[in-house]
Amino acid sequence: MITNNIDKRLKQIQAYDSTSSQSIATPKDSNRALDLIDSSILADPKSTYLDPQCGTGTLLLHLVKRLMVTLEPSIPNEKSRLKHIFKHQIYASDIDSLQVLVCKTNFKKAVNDRTFDVNVEQTDFKDVNKNVTCIVSGIDFGTTNDFVPHFRRIAQYTLILTRPNKCRYAATHVHELTRYRYLGVAQTSVPLCAMYFAPEASKTVEFVNDNESVKIDNPHYLPGTDLKQFTFAQEMINLDLEPFEAKYGSYYINANEVVNNPGKVQLIYQVGHDGGPFRKTVGVDKSIITPREGVGVHKVVISKNGNRGRKSVLKYAEPKYGTGHNAIWIKVESKSEAERVIDYYNSEEVTALVLALNATSPANGTGFWQRIPHYKNKNKVKEIYDKHYS
């Protein structure tokens, strides 16, 4: 079968990519992303597809393999179908001349014809203005905010593989998505997602995982794979309950003020494990202390850098301590109130909310705490939790 050439080429690319960091998505991830494209587009032999950051052309080869199935009713002859796809439907470009050469070679080998004229050219993605039905691309994370608006202007549909939340795709634009799927962690150890944009802007986004999908109006952030957890978190955020007020200390550990002013006031820089002492504190002179360090008040401290899918540890800190810039603190009136905050944070209701919010991003900054309702709202939090989990 002709599709064996495509499979063979994909396996060779995968073997090459296993020794490099070029490919950001596995074959499984690529196909789960392609699942987001409307079936009517894939079944139309007039649909066109462009990858303007094509790299080796791997994602488009997975698409070609799929088109070989969806176009069979309209183009029964397998050889004619393959050539039609590569000649009239598949387009690729890249700013890197070597990648363009590799992509051309891969396409020609998939067709099994070295003389076949494939549609691959060297172009910066910002200079691409070809009107196509659908953009399909695994893009450089740093270009997401530039990429999406540009290609939504020249393509009816856009499918990109990128990094959720940390991809710098502004939260105010999340509602523009049509479908979204969190794909997991790529071989480069970063989270990966698929974003699909259709022409219609309904502000209702369909979130998909392996087993189900949910539609959310005006979502606030991008979820992981647990959609029940996500819908619970969305409802909690929509309630706009009074949150905790979290603050940073003023100084990084290598700041001149810290390095050049040693003293007896201990600033917490690493919170450490639950049940143990603070992992790292640095002594500074009281002359450099500002209200931002929290010296002189009872507080709960937490690392601003957590672990994806895990909760960070909260600890009580006496008034004698302050915090550095990579620890967050929340003011309390006493040690007993700190213990109430920590117990509330460790409840199953707040645990579900915390894990939902850091499912794709480990950062637990002050913005994160703006989404955690204050413990005075614990009865309302439990009510909403029971609604979703009972």
Image (cartoon, helix red, strand yellow):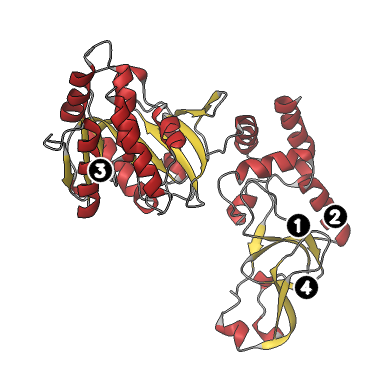
Q: Amino acid at mark 1?
A: Leu
Which one is nearer the viewer's eye here, 293 or 150? 150
Q: On the image, which quarter does residue 248 sit in?
A: bottom right
Q: Nearer the viewer, mark 4 or mark 1?
A: 1
C-alpha span from label 4 to label 1: 19 Å
C-alpha span from label 2 to label 1: 10 Å
Give the residue pinned by disc 4: 296
Q: Is residue 375 left or right of residue 261?
A: right
Residue under the point 44% across and 40% down: 26
C-alpha span from label 2 to label 3: 54 Å
Q: Are marks 4 and 1 in contact (CB under 8 Å)?
A: no
Give the residue pinned by disc 3: 52
C-alpha span from label 1 to label 3: 45 Å
Relative image position of residue 255 (x, y in whole percent): 56, 80
Q: Are marks 2 and 1 in contact (CB under 8 Å)?
A: no
Give the residue pinned by disc 2: 339
